[in-house]
Amino acid sequence: MVKTDLADIVCSIARTVGIVGERWTPLILRDLFLGITRFEDLRRDLGIASNVLAERLRTLVEHEIVETRVYQENPTRTEYVLTERGRDLYPVLTMLLAWGDRWLAGDDGPPLSVVHRDCGRVTEGVVVCGECAAPVTADNVTWHPGPGGRSGPGVALVGTRLTRLPEGLPPAE
């Protein structure tokens, strides 16, 4: 069976998963957000094989989610640092964390707490409307085709379930 390259699917979810959805990649991103930036520290923390870690980091660098920075000249040693593109994945990871805390944490409770520096309180990922800041849930949104939407592999039926935006309603910017 021929695998479809997710980058070829006309869907931003598919394209994103094609880059950051591989096994270990979300955990590598988690560690980078937590300040673990050196290859050996990432490998030791995750218990991941060096070749797998190197491949995942290579993909993240290739897609400009992570960049390498020299922290020692002789011998040359580099660390991995999130770029702006990488830092924009923060909400994705916090939503995965919130879902896992709700459904998989077990009797001991969540294994990690996120504290909002501005107010000093433990917080969790919440999706809010970019226009009115009200909470967004699966029950209070509708999906419509965007300007780049079209039918194709991976979205053969999706297009038939979407309706055009109401007249006069501009797409999100």
Image (cartoon, rainbow, N blue to C red):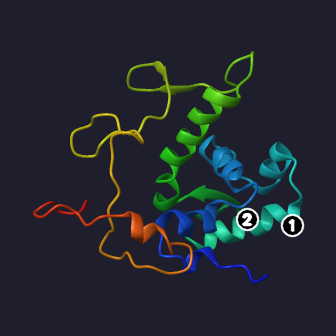
Q: Would residue 34 appear left or right of 129 to someone viewing this image?
A: right
Q: Position of residue 90 (x, y in %)?
A: 51, 47
Relative vertical location of residue 112 with respect to residue 172 in this rendering, above or below: above
Q: Nearer the viewer, residue 83 or 15?
A: 15
Q: Which mark is residue 38?
A: none
Q: Along the polypeptide, which appears first: circle 1 or circle 2?
A: 1
Q: Nearer the viewer, residue 152 or 114?
A: 152
Q: Position of residue 82 (x, y in %)?
A: 56, 56
Could you tell me which secondary element the residue under label 1 belongs to?
helix
Relative vertical location of residue 111 with respect to residue 155 in this rendering, above or below: above
Density class for disc 1 (Cα within 10 Å; few <14, some 14-19, many ≥20) is: few
Can I make out residue 68 in this image? no
Residue at 51 percent of width and 75 percent of height: 156
Density class for disc 2 (Cα within 10 Å; few <14, some 14-19, many ≥20) is: many
Residue at 70 percent of width and 52 percent of height: 28
**Residue position marked by numbered label 1 in the rendering:** 51
Can I make out residue 142 in this image? yes
Could you tell me which secondary element the residue under label 2 belongs to?
helix
The Cα atoms of the two marked residues, 1 and 2, are separated by 9 Å
